[in-house]
Image (cartoon, rainbow, N blue to C red):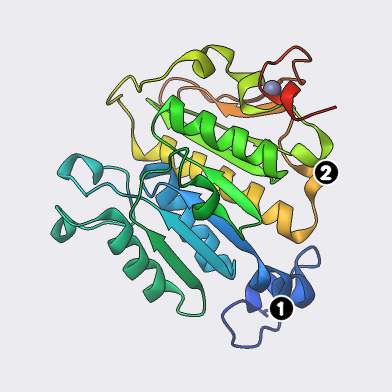
Amino acid sequence: MVNIFKFSDSRYSRQEAMPEWGVDKQSILKTARVAVIGAGGVKSTLLLSLVAGGIGTIKIIEYDRIELSNLNRQLLFRTKDIGKFKGEVAVETLTELNPDIDILLDLKEVNEENINDLLEGYDLIVEGGNSPFGRNLINEYCLRMRKPMVHASAQFSYGYVLSVLPHIQSACFACYFSNDYSRKNTTGAVPVNVLATSIAGSLGAVEVFKWFLGYEENMIYNKKLYFSSLLLSENFDVELNPRNLSCPVCSKYYE
Ligand SMILES: [Zn+2]
């Protein structure tokens, strides 16, 4: 079989050969600065995709340590890494994958005092706080600073992705999850598997690439792309979720 494609032997040649991607847009990705909060299951796959695809600067904010029960889904880590900081191992693994990427690390939990400093200078925020408090804090930061936020999540065999685009006054996180917004504490460990986290992570990465490659209009905003139980059904679906005009959170920032 004759290979009709001619690829130069470079790291990004297979994606640069795509008309919707190309060499010019690849160079734009090199200037992109993304902050990712958390390096767990969903974020493992998401980070691997951002780094492999050439997002130029990535900050990981993660303070947790690796446990045996993480390894069924958190693909950045190996059994020998148990007990180490997730952030440190993530930087090591991701740098081995692509040493051309600037990867920064903060071994911190985002809070009201440090959020401005931690996220300053980043164009897009991937939300992944493991508590409703953290999620809501980041939602409000993105609204205040008019930065796009990507949220991807999975539990059991379910998962979803959505983006918040404050510059066009899209639905904010609290418009989707008003009950979550009033909740302060996490519900603790929930059942989850690698199928759900990897798909959710990939869907989240797609949102990040859409933003920087110039496909903002194709992003998942004012709606949620979700999949229901992968083991029990075949469903992927979109649920429309327009902005709640009486949302107490984004109403503070939108006109
Ligand atoms: Zn809102």
What's the mark number on residue 5? 1
**Mark 2 residue crowding within 10 angstroms, few (<14) / some (14–19) / many (20+):** few
- Measured as percent of width and height from the top left, residue 8 is found at 65, 88
Residue found at x 59% / y 71%: 56
Quadrant the N terminus occupies: bottom right
| Figure quarter occupied by ligand 1 | top right
- Observer-nearest residue: 1 or 24? 24
Name the residue type under label 2: Glu
Furthest-front residue in view?
113
- Number of numbered labels in the structure image: 2
Which quadrant would residue 133 be assigned to in this image?
Answer: top left
Is mark 1 in CB contact (under 8 Å) with mark 2? no
- Measured as percent of width and height from the top left, residue 215 is found at 79, 52
Name the residue type under label 1: Phe
Which quadrant would residue 29 be assigned to in this image?
Answer: bottom right
| 8 in relation to 37, above or below | below
Residue found at x 80% / y 28%: 254
Which quadrant would residue 149 be assigned to in this image?
Answer: top right
Q: In terms of secondary structure, where does tag 1 sit?
A: loop
User: Which one is earlier in the sequence, the residue at label 1 or at label 2?
Assistant: 1
Q: Which residue is mark 2?
A: 217
| Horizontal side, residue 172 vs residue 53: left or right | right
